[in-house]
Image: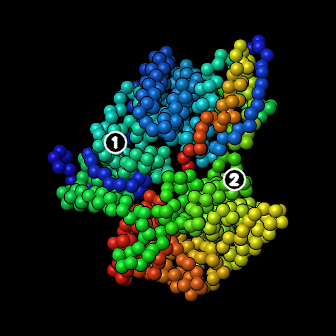
Amino acid sequence: MSDVALTAEVLLEHEVGLHARPSVKLTKLAKTFRSRIDVSPGPDGPWIDAKSIVKVMGARAPKGTVLHFRAAGEDARAALDALVALVRNDFETGAAGEAE
Amino acid sequence: MTGTPAPGPELIGRAASPGLAAGPVVVVDALAGDVVASGDPRTEAANLTRALETASAQIAGLTETVEPEAAEMLEFQLAMLEDEELTAPVRAAIADGASAAAAFAAVLDAAIADYGASSDEYFRARTADLADIRERVLRALSGKASEAPAAGAVLVGKDLTPTRFLETDWSAGGGIALADGSPSSHVAMLARARGVPMVTGLGAFDTSDLKEALVDGDSGRVRFNPDEAARRQHAERVEALAREAEAAKTYLGRPAATACGVPISVMINVAAPEEVDALDPAHCDGIGLMRTEFLFHGAGGLPDEDCQYQAYRKVLEWAGGRSVTIRTLDAGGDKPVPGLTVEESNPFLGCRGIRLSLRRPEVFRVQLRALARAGCRGNLQVMLPMVSMPEEIEAAARLLDTCVAELHAEGHEAVRPPLGIMVEVPAVAVTPERFAAAAFFSIGSNDLTQYVLAAGRDSPDVAELGRADDPAVLALVASTLRGGAAAGLPVSLCGDAGSDLAVLPKLLACGLRRVSVAPAALARVKAALAGMRLGDDG
C-alpha cells in the first residue's frame, strides 16, 4: 500500500446498529471502489476490511458508534465520501422495519 | 405398506401461523451426511467452488421473486457466500486434506456457534441464515438437487430453512408441520406474511408412511393420513372460517355488542408502535395493553427517556382520545433483557415485572418519566405487571409522584396517569380487595393460568393442563371481577383467552365486559360477540 491513507468518521445512527441489512449495503458500496478500505468502531482500530460482510458483521457495532473509515488508493476520497453519505443517510432506509 | 396408509395420530404443537391447510405430505428433512469425498484436495476445492456457485445462483434466482423483506435476507446470505473471508478457512482446511463438505460444515458450525453466543437477539437470529447457507451448500456438494414440492403440499420435517420456504409455490395453498422450529423463527414470520398455516414443535415423529396432512394453524394441531370423517370435518371448518371472515368485515366498524344487546368494550394489544400504522383507531375501543419490552431489546442498551417518550406519544396520538393502557417493563420470565434481568433457575417465579423494576429504580424512573410526559398527549393509563403485594403499588405510586414533581420542577409538561395493575398472580385474584389502591385491574389470563395450574407456558408437555377455561381459572376471573366491582374499579382481560372463541362466552358468563385482543383477532371477536347471548353458557 504505497498510497497515504485518507480517513473519515461518521456517527452510526441506524436503529439496530451495523446489522445484516446495513452491513450488506456498506460492503456492497465499498466493493465498487478499487481502493483498499478499512472500517473500525474506534479511532485506534481494530481495522477491518470494509468489503467483507463476515468482518463487518463481526464488528457488531451498535447504534451510537462512531465509525472510522480508512482508505488508500486512487479513488480513496470518493470512496470515503460515498461511505460517509451512506451511513449519514441511515443506509437509505425509511422507517426501520427490522422484525423482532 | 402400499395402498391406504393407516390413519395417523393427531399431533399437537405450537400454532405458528394461523389458518387451515390440507394437502399431500412432502418430507423436507435436512440432508443426511452422505457426501462422497474424493480424497483429492484439488478435486475437493473445485467441488467447493462449483457448489458455492450453484448455491449463489439459486439464492440470486429467488431474490427476484420474493417480497422486499425476504429479499434483504437473501442478499445477506448471498453476500456471506461470496465473501472470501468465509471461504478462505474452508479452502485452507481442504488443502490440509479435509473434504469440501466436512471443511465447509466445520467453518459454518463455528460461525453458527459464534452468532448463537451473542447477547444480541438480532445476531442470534442470524444463525438461521447461516444454517440455511450451510444446508444449501452441502446439498449442492452432494449433487442431489432438492426437488421443489408440488404446489399445495404440506411440508413436513424437523425444521424448515427460510430459503426452502421461499422456493415453495404456495399459490395453491399448502401448509407446514415441523417437529422442531419456533413461532418466532424467520420462517414463521414469512409464513404469517404469506398466510401459510404453520405448526411447530410437534416433537419427534415417524415420517416414513405419511401421505396426507391436515394442518390447523389456529390451534396448533396436525392430523396425518386422515380418514374420510376427519377430512370432511376439516373442509367444513374451512368453509365456516371463510363465512366468518366475511361476517367479520361487517362487524369491524361497529361498536361491539352481544346478540342480546349488551355492549362489550373490545380493545387491542400492541407490542410495537409500528403495529398501529395499519389500523383504524375507530375499529377498537382503545389499547388495552401496550407492551414496552420492544424498547429494551435494541442493540444500543437500555432506551433513554426521549426514545421511550416518542414511542408512547406515537401510540397515544394514534388513539385520539381513546384509552391507552401502557404496561411498564415486563422483563424476566420468558422475556430476558440483557443487562437488566438476572439468570434464575425458575424465572417465571423470579425477579420479573414490577419486582425487577422496583429493584432497579434508576431504570424504572426513566420509564415513568417518559410515561408522565407522554400522558399529556392522550388518554393514558399505566399498568404494573406481576404485582403480588399491595406494597408494590404504593412503592410504584411514590416513585411516579416523585417523577411527576421533578418534571414539573424542571419545567416539563407532565401528568400523573392513573396506575393500575395486571392480575396474573393468583394472590391478587384470590383477595382483590387488598389491591383497591389500583386504578384498574387487567387480567393477564396467560400467566394467571400457568400459575393457577402450575403448568409452564414454555413446556409443550403440560400445554393440555394450562387451559384458560379451567374452572379454577374462571373462579379467579369471577373473583377479580367481584373485587373490582366492590372497589369501583374497571376490570378488563388482556390475555389470549379473550380471543379464544371457545373461552370467551365463559368469561362473559363470569361478568367480564371488557377484553383486549390481538389486532388480527379484532374482527373475529367482534363478529363472534354479536352471535353470543349472555346466559348461554352460564
On screen, residue B414 versus residue B44, left or right, reads right
Q: Position of residue B506 (x, y in %)?
A: 40, 77
Q: Residues within 10 Å of mark 1 (few under 14, many from 20)?
A: many
Q: Position of residue B178 (x, y in %)?
A: 39, 49
Residue linked to disc 2: B307
Q: Amino acid at mark 1?
A: Trp
On screen, residue B172 versus residue B352, left or right, reads left
Q: Subunit of mark 1?
A: B
Q: Quadrant of the C terminus of chain B?
A: bottom left
For this rendering, which residue is in front, B9 or B214? B214
Q: Amino acid at mark 2?
A: Cys
Query: Can residue B361 be seen by looking at this rendering?
Result: no
Residue at 44% across, 76% down: B263
Residue at 30% across, 57% down: B242
Total marks in image = 2
Height in image: B79 above or below B455? Answer: above
Height in image: B28 above or below B421? Answer: above
Query: Can residue B403 be seen by looking at this rendering?
Result: yes
For this rendering, which residue is in front, B237 or B59? B237
Residue linked to disc 1: B170
| Co-location on one chain, circles 2 and 1 | yes
Mark 1 lies on a secondary structure that is loop
Mark 2 lies on a secondary structure that is helix
Q: How is the image coloured?
A: rainbow
Residue at 69% across, 57% down: B309
Q: Residue furthest bottom?
A: B486
Residue B232 occupies which quadrant of the picture?
A: bottom left
Q: Position of residue B131 (x, y in %)?
A: 49, 38
Height in image: A77 above or below B184? Answer: above
